Image (tube, rainbow, N blue to C red):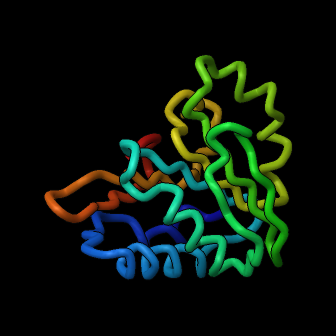
Amino acid sequence: MKTDKWCKVVGKFNLQSESDTVALAKKIAALLEKGDVLALSGELGTGKTFFTQQLCRFLGIEENVSSPSYVLINLYKGSIPVTHADFYRLTAWEEVLELGLDEMMENRITVIEWPEIAFDLLPENTLHIRFRFSGEAREATINSSVKGA
């Protein structure tokens, strides 16, 4: 994974509608390859799961993509397999290790919602996307150079 490939998507994106989120997911999906990790932060309802659903659609995932809040990890088959994790209910970074996520990251694209508990465990080139409410719209801030956008 190369840091410079993220330069096309680093910055702030105003997401006025679902179609803006879909367009952002498409742009990022075009850059992804095995081993890439996306860390999605933001309050409840800011669009993390919707973004992931669209991202998976552009990666050729045909099955229903749902929030893994209660199961912690969903695995999807596609031309590049996708791991979709949600750390919202975890209370310690050791729980992340117990999931074995680090072993899955090599040969899959990994998308993690609520990654804050595991920032120190994420690969250096993780693409961090922070979703937030911005008036009636939403905003996505994307960063790859530091942990946590």
Horizontal side of residue 119 vs 32, given as left or right: left
The x and y percentages for residue 141 are 33, 57
Q: Residue at x 71, y 70 (%)?
A: 33
Question: Quick one: quadrant of the N terminus?
Answer: bottom right
Horizontal side of residue 67 vs 102, given as left or right: left
Q: Residue at x 27, y 61 (%)?
A: 138
The x and y percentages for residue 124 are 59, 45
Picture quadrant where residue 59 is located = bottom right
Q: How many marks?
A: 0
104 relative to 100, above or below = below
> Relative to the observer, which residue lies in front, 87 or 120?
87
Horizontal side of residue 4 vs 46, given as left or right: right
100 relative to 16, above or below = above
The x and y percentages for residue 72 are 70, 39
Q: Residue at x 34, y 60 (%)?
A: 140
Q: Residue furthest left?
A: 135
Picture quadrant where residue 96 is located = top right
Q: Residue at x 68, y 53 (%)?
A: 84
12 relative to 115, above or below = below
The x and y percentages for residue 43 are 36, 42
